[in-house]
Image: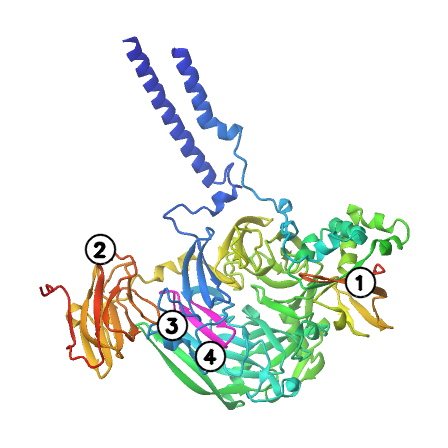
């Protein structure tokens, strides 16, 4: 009895304790969320609980991977790798027949590129979440990615260019994306001695127009001296209508640039008045110049990309078009050129300098009106430095590269050599904070940080070197992104995470501008693919000579047909696989033994095609590669390959009993 | 028995609910000033970088002390490439008495940093790339003049007396401290 009573007391107390515990802990959790004692705990600032969404999307270029990595910010979780300029066997991108034309160029099929600067589309200078553009450096191109599908839907090649680095950098309403050549090239391209650089080489700036529904077109090119056009940004607000390009190698050298391109005290920022260019185009002041370049468009209904080779471009020459281009002298090989949210300040990040040079747009306009020119180069007036400079940010660090803005009057600049991000005030040029990066920061990104309306809560530093930051993985180490909280006076390091390839530049945007438009599948009734099979009844196999078209469907958990016979060695078999699923997150994969390409990864409602050229007789399995269902392992089939001279009739089946 | 139960219960309640407030878990706040940069990377197998070259030289202890006092260690281990003109201890000793001691004082940190940056060029200027009459742009933002006399290379009047390759650039040992 006594022991029973004590037992009850213990039980009672235990319940009380649990109740208090529960209450106490709940209380604490709510305190931390509302900014109480634990608000400075950085772990809680980047912790996004399982099942919850990040506040921002971060789009980081893959650099030499040629792709874009999509990350959640602040968690740093990798959400998707979007294949853009490089083939991706994981998704069949560049391997399936539908996407191969996207990678076509005037040099033929180019399966790789170096993708540096993602740039979100804008409306009135504000990121609109519709598209993201990115440049291909090596074989000059610009790609457009649709943010309702997160797929590459268009790629345009840039002629008369070599090293498309100062690109794509949109204008305020995505009227244009731009493409400045980093390397001077002979114009027109021809066989000349390399040391004839100064006389035969030119530098071309390209303005690519973007229509309401996408569709890029080269509107015009501007022919300039063969400087190296390094980076660009377009004006905004008052400076809307202008685009600014940095230059280095104004020495016009072609060898050992490390030394030879660092001789001049000042290089230039080229200011291009593209509204004026539009007038000159209307007036017919251009030359139509032969040029060969590919324009590749992916159709979301047919799920097929087409490639068209274009034959000419309109070229404007500053000598014939006064007022089109001005040079703003800027110290020491300026790298990034960044325009503040008001559009007044144009920041030249002189990468060999210890200082930042800030030009004023309104002073520039005055200097133009007053014709305050130092000299003229190939018809381009060079404005007097002191007439355009607004201020200098002194001794902020070593090796300034890029500047972004928080929309609260502050600018943030990355310094490569001193591995710092420096916060300074626009207008007073006063340095107010410094944060270390680990290590050797290149670009930095604030969501909307190069637009008119930055969403200045976080800053991401994109680092080139990680050395001892993570567990070592042999000589090749990952690059990294580092997340800083910039909501307060001082930058606060929150997180450090590895990235794919090289996170060269990045863009960020609040998720609410993208999420409502994201598609879950492609409506099957809209599928216009030439080789679609709209249902299993459509599934069939057709032969045209040695070409065999397999109209195949997938649905959980089988292929139709899943047995195919009558294929011969030497045939070219096209598996056109239509995924009949109309459900969220149910792709099917398709792979067949001995395929010399990759798999297919087919989204609901989509048709994709894999070519298979059997070289051996036998019976070869194919199967679904994406774990689609509980009976995914059963999603398999066979294709029988007979000798070239075989009489086995073409046949296919699904579900019929096997002959005994 | 009851007392002991109550005691246990009180202790449990105390531990469960008040412990985090009275003895908080160390916050994961990261103070920038506490974070060590790239110069703290431990790596004994790679080719020596500019800082390691200086650290390994018994003739450059003053320079190393100055680099540390100016907080420029991370700069000298960065990817570079950097060309550093490294005055020897003797070169520092040749300065007027008290100069070095004065520069090493914390209040003169930025002045010292400026002088050290005056000894570094962004770029990899190996000996044969230094030409008579050439100007080099230094990390301080100033230019220095290169001259060649009787096969000797002088930079801003300081003679290169030895050259050591580094993984992130080159160290030219010079016989004078270069002053802007």
The chain holding disc 4 is A
Asked if labels 4 and 1 share a chain, the reply is no
Overall secondary structure of the magenta stretch?
Answer: strand
Which-is-in-front pick, marks 3 and 4? 3
The structure residue drawn at horizontal position 38% and vertical position 80%, both measured from the top left corner, is: A307
The chain holding disc 1 is B
What crowding class fits label 2: few (fewer than 14 Cα within 10 Å), some (14-19), or many (20 or more)?
few
Q: Earlier in the sequence, mark 2 or mark 4?
A: 4
The chain holding disc 3 is A
Q: Which residue is mark 2?
A: A631
The stretch of residues the image draws in magenta is: A131-152
Alpha carbons under labels 2 and 3: distance apart: 29 Å
Q: What element does badge 4 sit on?
A: strand
Q: Which residue is mark 3?
A: A94
Q: What element does badge 1 sit on?
A: strand
Q: Residue A157 shows which numbered tag? A: 4
Asked which quadrant contains residue B1, the reply is top left
Q: Quadrant of the C terminus of chain A?
A: bottom left
Please provide percent x and percent y for residue A657.
10, 63
Asked which quadrant contains residue B91, the reply is bottom right
Asked if labels 2 and 4 share a chain, the reply is yes
Taking the magenta stretch, the answer to whether it contains residue A102 is no
Asked if labels 3 and 4 share a chain, the reply is yes
């Amino acid at each position: 009895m006594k022991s029973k009573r004590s037992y009850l007391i213990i039980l009672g107390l235990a319940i009380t304790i649990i109740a208090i515990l529960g209450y106490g802990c709940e209380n604490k959790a709510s305190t931390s969320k509302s900014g109480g004692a634990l608000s400075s705990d950085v772990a809680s600032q980047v912790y996004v609980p399982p099942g919850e969404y990040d506040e921002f999307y971060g789009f980081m270029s893959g650099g030499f991977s040629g792709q874009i990595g999509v990350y959640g910010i602040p968690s740093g979780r990798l959400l998707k790798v979007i294949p853009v300029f490089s083939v991706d066997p994981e998704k069949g991108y560049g391997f399936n027949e539908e996407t191969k034309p996207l990678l076509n160029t005037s040099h033929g099929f180019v399966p790789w590129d170096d993708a540096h600067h993602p740039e979100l589309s804008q409306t009135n200078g504000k990121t609109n979440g519709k598209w993201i553009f990115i440049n291909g450096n090596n074989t000059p191109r610009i790609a457009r990615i649709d943010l309702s599908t997160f797929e590459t839907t268009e790629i345009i090649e840039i002629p008369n260019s070599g090293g498309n680095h100062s690109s794509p950098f949109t204008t305020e309403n995505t009227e244009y994306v731009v493409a400045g050549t980093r390397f001077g090239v002979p114009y027109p391209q021809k066989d000349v001695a390399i040391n004839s650089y100064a006389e035969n080489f030119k530098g071309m700036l390209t303005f690519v127009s973007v229509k309401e529904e996408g569709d890029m077109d080269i509107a015009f090119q501007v022919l300039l001296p063969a400087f190296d056009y390094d980076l660009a940004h377009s004006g905004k607000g008052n400076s809307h209508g202008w685009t600014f390009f940095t230059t280095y190698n104004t020495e016009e050298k072609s060898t050992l640039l490390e030394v030879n391109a660092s001789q001049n005290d000042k290089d230039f920022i080229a200011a291009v008045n593209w509204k004026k260019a539009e007038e000159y185009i209307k007036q017919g002041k251009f030359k139509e110049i032969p040029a060969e370049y590919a324009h590749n468009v992916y159709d979301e209904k047919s799920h097929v990309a087409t490639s068209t080779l274009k034959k000419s471009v309109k070229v404007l020459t500053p000598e014939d078009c006064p007022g089109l281009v001005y040079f703003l002298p800027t110290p020491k090989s300026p790298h990034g050129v960044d325009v503040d949210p008001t559009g007044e300040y144009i920041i030249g990040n002189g990468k060999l300098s210890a200082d930042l040079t800030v030009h004023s747009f309104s002073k520039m306009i005055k200097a133009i009106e007053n014709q305050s020119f130092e000299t003229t180069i190939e018809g381009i007036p060079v404005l007097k430095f002191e007439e355009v400079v607004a201020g200098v940010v002194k001794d902020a660090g070593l090796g300034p590269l890029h500047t972004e803005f928080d929309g609260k009057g502050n600018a943030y600049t990355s310094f490569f050599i001193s591995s710092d991000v420096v916060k300074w005030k626009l207008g007073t040029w006063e340095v107010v904070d410094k944060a270390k990066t680990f290590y050797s920061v290149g670009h930095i990104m604030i969501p909307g940080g190069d637009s008119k309306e930055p969403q200045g809560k976080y800053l991401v530093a994109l680092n080139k070197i990680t050395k001892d930051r993570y567990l070592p993985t042999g000589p090749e180490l990952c690059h990294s992104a580092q997340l800083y909280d910039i909501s307060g006076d001082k930058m606060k390091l929150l997180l450090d995470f590895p990235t794919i390839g090289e996170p060269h530049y990045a863009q960020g945007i609040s998720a609410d501008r993208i999420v409502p438009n994201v598609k879950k599948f492609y409506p099957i009734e809209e599928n216009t693919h030439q080789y679609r099979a709209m249902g299993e009844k459509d599934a069939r196999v057709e032969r045209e000579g040695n070409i065999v078209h397999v109209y195949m469907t997938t649905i959980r958990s089988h292929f139709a047909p899943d047995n195919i016979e009558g294929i011969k060695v030497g045939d070219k078999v096209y598996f056109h696989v239509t995924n009949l699923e109309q459900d969220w997150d149910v792709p099917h994969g398709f792979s067949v033994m001995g395929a010399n390409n990759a798999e297919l990864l087919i989204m609901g409602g989509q048709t994709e095609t894999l070519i298979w050229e059997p070289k051996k007789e036998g019976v070869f399995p194919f199967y679904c590669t994406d774990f689609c269902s509980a009976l995914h392992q059963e999603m398999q089939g066979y294709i029988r390959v007979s000798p070239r001279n075989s009489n086995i009739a073409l046949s296919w089946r699904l579900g019929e009993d096997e002959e005994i | 028995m009851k007392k002991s139960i109550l005691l246990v219960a009180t202790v449990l309640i105390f531990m469960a609910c008040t412990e985090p407030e009275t003895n908080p878990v160390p916050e994961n706040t990261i103070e920038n000033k506490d974070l060590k940069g790239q110069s703290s990377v431990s790596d004994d197998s790679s080719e020596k970088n500019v800082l390691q070259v200086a650290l390994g030289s018994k003739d450059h202890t003053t320079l190393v002390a100055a680099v540390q006092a100016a907080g420029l260690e991370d700069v000298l281990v960065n990817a570079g490439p950097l060309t550093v003109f490294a005055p020897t201890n003797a070169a520092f000793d040749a300065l007027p008495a008290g100069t070095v001691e004065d520069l090493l004082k914390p209040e003169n940190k930025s002045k010292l940093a400026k002088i050290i940056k005056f000894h570094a060029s962004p770029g990899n200027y190996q000996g044969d790339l230094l030409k008579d009459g050439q100007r080099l742009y230094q990390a301080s933002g100033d230019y220095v003049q290169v001259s060649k006399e009787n096969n000797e290379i002088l930079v801003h009047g300081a003679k290169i007396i030895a050259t050591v390759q580094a993984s992130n650039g080159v160290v030219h040992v010079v016989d004078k401290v270069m002053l802007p």
